[in-house]
Structures are given as structure tokens and as C-alpha cells.
Image (cartoon, helix red, strand yellow):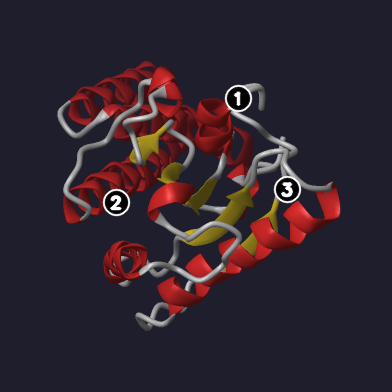
Amino acid sequence: MKKYKFLVVTSITLFMLNGCTAGPNTQAGTAIGAASGAVLGGIIGGSGKDMAIGAVLGAAAGGAIGYNMDKQANDIARSLGTGVNNDPLAYLDPNQDLIVSNNGKYVKIMFRDKMMFNTGSDKLTNSASYKVSKVGQILKQYPQTIVETAGHTDKRGNYSYNMNLSKNRARSVADRLYSTGIANNSYITGCSYAKPLVDNSNEQNMALNRRVEIYLYPKSDVRVDACR
């Protein structure tokens, strides 16, 4: 029994150390997977041996998910000519028109409205169409990723008008993604002005709030409400 308990601890430690070399999400996924696998193994088999096997398999699965998220975020960022930026204040910088972030649960790509659509339009500009297609090309390598596109407006006009505009813009981005040939499960969400980044008190702030976001989820149970 002691031998197998030692193996559990060793397995978790080794996989966590391995995760450190591959990225923060790999480390987190490995640790969680190992712990969950160990508990499950103990419940099913009730022995140290079953816990050890569960830890090894769980750590491998958790590490793989984390690695895919890290790699996916980096691949997309490179294809768009940028890097992964997890600074929460980056969204408040008016010079940041494109942000790829990875919070450990999902990858998010934020496109500012001014680089995506003309005023009042839901038709992608040529530049935006090209950038979104680059994301689609990367997603071909990740067919299990769940995709959600969410549109956000400022507070000018009524809520209903902005809801339609935000959803139509999100749909335009989704349509361009899928025109590249991907077959990922997807959601399209319009948020109107329900989730501002800053108060809609002036033109600069309103420009920050107008955006389309692409969420990339490794599994359905980590999906968030994009409008809250």
C-alpha cells in the first residue's frame, strides 16, 4: 500500500514539473487531472494501486488539454502578428485593436469594432475578413474546440437595435470562420450594450466597448455567459 501511495505522489509531482515546461495551463490541467484521477481511482478500486493508475491517466489527460489551449492561443496570436496578452488592463488601451488572451479555462480573441466594420454596418471590412480567416485556418487543427462569437455595442441607440446589430456582427464573424472549412460546434451571441468594458460616457470609451469577441472553449462545461 505504501508503495502505491508513494507512486501517486511521485506521479503527480512529475506531471506537475513537466507542466511547468509547457505553459501555465498545462501545469494547471496536469495537476487537476492527476488529483481527480487519483480520487476517482480510489473510489472505484479502493486501493492505492487504483489511485496511482488514476493519477497517471488523469494527469496525462489534464496536461493534454492545457497544452492544447496554450498551443492554440500561441498559434492564433502568431497568425495574427501578435502575442498572447493576459494583462486585464490591455482591454482598456485604445491602441490595442486586437488581443489574444488565455485565462486557463478558455482562449479569447478580441477585435475592436473600428477595425472590423464600418459605422452601423455588420459587413466585415476586407482587412477584418482576412484576419478572421486566419483564425479559421488555425481552428482546422483543433476540431474539438467549441467556438462562440459575441458582439458588443456602445449605448447609442436603443437596446433592441443594438442587440440586432451586435448579433449580426457576431454572425458575420462566425460565417467567415466557417467559410474556411471548419466544422467546430459553435454559438452566436449578441450582447447589445449589456457588457461595457468602461462607462459609455464619451466617444473614446464607446469605441472601447464596440467589439467582437471569439471564445474558444476546450469543453462545453467551461462556457461562460459572454454578456455578463
What residue does disc 1 label?
202
Rounded to the nearest whole Å, what is the CA distance between mark 1 and mark 3? 18 Å
In terms of image quadrants, where is residue 128? bottom left
In the rendered structure, which amino acid carries the disc numbered 1? Asn
Q: Residue at x 27, y 20 (%)?
A: 13
Relative to residue 16, is residue 46 drawn left or right? Answer: right
Q: Position of residue 225 (x, y in %)?
A: 70, 42
Rounded to the nearest whole Å, what is the CA distance between mark 3 and mark 2? 29 Å
In this picture, is 129 found above or below 147? Answer: below
Rounded to the nearest whole Å, what is the CA distance between mark 2 and mark 1? 36 Å
Q: Quadrant of the N terminus?
A: top left
In terms of image quadrants, where is residue 25? top left
Dot 1: what SS? loop
Q: Residue at x 45, y 60 (%)?
A: 145
Indicate which disc residue 72 carries: 2
Relative to residue 181, is residue 155 drawn left or right? Answer: right
Closer to us: 152 or 85: 152
Dot 2: what SS? helix
Would you say residue 98 is visible in this rendering?
yes
Badge 2 crowding class, 10 Å Cα cut-off, few under 14, some 14 to 19, many 20 or more, is many
What residue does disc 3 label?
192
Q: Position of residue 122 (x, y in %)?
A: 57, 67
Instruction: State which mark lies toward you, 1 or 3.
Output: 1
Mark sitting earlier along the chain (3/2) = 2
In the rendered structure, which amino acid carries the disc numbered 2? Gln
Q: Position of residue 197 (x, y in %)?
A: 58, 27
In this picture, is 85 found above or below 115? Answer: above
Dot 3: what SS? loop
Q: Position of residue 160 (x, y in %)?
A: 84, 55
Residues marked 3 and 2 touching at CB (< 8 Å): no
